[in-house]
Amino acid sequence: MFEQCLYFNTTSLARKLEREWSTAFKPFELTPPQAFMLRVILQKPASLQSELANEMNITRSTATRTLEGLLKLGYIKRVTSLKDGRETEYHPTPKAVKVKDGINDASAAVTKRMRKVLGNDVFEKVVGEVKAVSESL
């Protein structure tokens, strides 16, 4: 019925991928959005909320909720920006640095499983095409 429906098929895929990454990040008590946001903050400490929202391709309000969750879990801290006192930077805490390798390894394990299930060529092609479609819209 929905063979040609981009919305239905991408949403169905997203739900399946959400389950995979939820399982991977459960030991860290992180949701997939929180884990990916934390990975960005670990890679780019002192990021502003707007920069994080852009990097994650989400709205500022969604970024706010994700950041609030990471703050409550003790993975990040807010610091007033020295460049502009109206801005807030987000920095990883020692707790975040401690789990960095673990969350990266957990994500890599899911990716490795997906590559094995789909085959490396299909995996690369699908990721590339989905990214291109997303950027076009």
Image (spheres, rainbow, N blue to C red):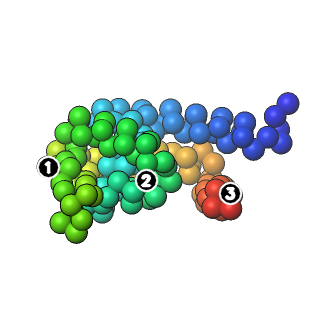
Q: How many labels does the image show?
A: 3
Tag 3, which secondary structure? Answer: loop
Q: In which quarter of the image is the C terminus?
A: bottom right
- Say which amino acid is labelled 1: Pro
First in sequence: mark 1 vs mark 3: 1
Image depth: mark 1 or mark 2 in front:
2
68 and 5: which is toward the camera: 68
The image position of residue 85, as x and y in percent, is 21, 61
- Disc 1 and disc 3: Cα gap in Å? 38 Å
* Residue 106 visible here: no
Mark 2 surroundings: few (<14), some (14-19) or many (≥20) residues within 10 A: some
49 and 41: which is toward the camera: 49
Tag 1, which secondary structure? Answer: helix
Residue ID at (32%, 43%): 67
Residue 127's tag is none
Mark 1 surroundings: few (<14), some (14-19) or many (≥20) residues within 10 A: few
- Say which amino acid is labelled 3: Leu
Tag 2, which secondary structure? Answer: helix
The image position of residue 48, as x and y in percent, is 32, 58
Q: In which quarter of the image is the N terminus?
A: top right
Read off the residue under disc 2.
Answer: 53
- Disc 2 and disc 3: Cα gap in Å? 17 Å
- Disc 1 and disc 2: Cα gap in Å? 23 Å
The image position of residue 15, as x and y in percent, is 58, 34
Read off the residue under disc 1.
Answer: 94
Read off the residue under disc 3.
Answer: 137
Residue ID at (75%, 44%): 6
